[in-house]
Amino acid sequence: MRIGELARRAGTSARTLRFYEQAGLLPAPLRTPSGYRDYDDTVVDRLAFVRAAQAAGLTLAEIREVVAVREAQGPPCAHVVELLDRHANELDTRIAELEATRAEVRRLRERAATLDPAACVDADVCNVIT
């Protein structure tokens, strides 16, 4: 199938497909005698995998690694589990940072309720935060 048909079936753009091909996420398609890309049906499944992996938080580089492991060694399940564990740990760290930031924002908001705006001096910029 040509790139336009694949883009319609996959719900993406031809530009995205060319980018994925250059990034090593899609195999290079065969070419018709006139030079058009000629994709087979397996690319639709590969695109579904790429989208699902992105939704799980994997970067394009990580997805390319998973594809490379699959092509070189077979099922990449152990590699994927390691990636997911790492992402889960990074999310836990980020969530903790966000919770700490939320607590600080709430503390400052409570503090603001006790301050007199007239007492704010130019040097402080805003005495809610200082």
Image: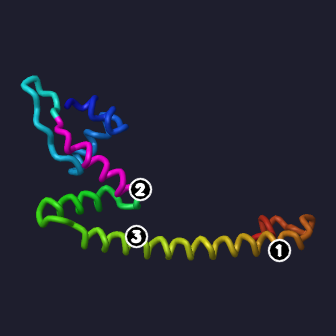
On the image, the x and y values in percent for residue 35 come to 12, 27
On the image, the x and y values in percent for residue 114 come to 89, 73
Q: Which stretch is magenta? A: 39-54
Work out whether mark 2 precedes mark 1 in sequence or the reverse, and give the earlier one: 2
| Picture layout, residue 22 above or below residue 63 | above
Q: Does the magenta-highlighted stretch encompass residue 70?
A: no
Circle 1: residue type: Arg
From the image, state whether disc 1 or disc 3 is nearer to you. 3
**What quarter of the picture does the N terminus occupy?**
top left
Does residue 9 show up?
yes
Q: Which residue in the structure is indicated by mark 3?
A: 87
Residue 55's disc is 2
Residue 111's disc is 1
On the image, the x and y values in percent for residue 82 come to 31, 74
Real-space CA distance between mark 2 and mark 1, rounded to the nearest whole angstrom: 39 Å
- Classed neighbour count for the residue bearing mark 3: other residues with Cα under 10 Å, few (<14), some (14–19), many (≥20): some
Real-space CA distance between mark 1 and mark 3, rounded to the nearest whole angstrom: 36 Å
On the image, the x and y values in percent for residue 63 come to 28, 58
- Describe residue 101's horizontal placement relative to residue 64 as left or right: right
Q: Under tag 2, what secondary structure?
A: helix
Q: Residue at x 62, y 74 (%)?
A: 99
Dominant secondary structure (helix, strand or loop) of the stretch shown in magenta = helix
Q: Residue 129 lies in what quarter of the image? A: bottom right
Residue 18's disc is none
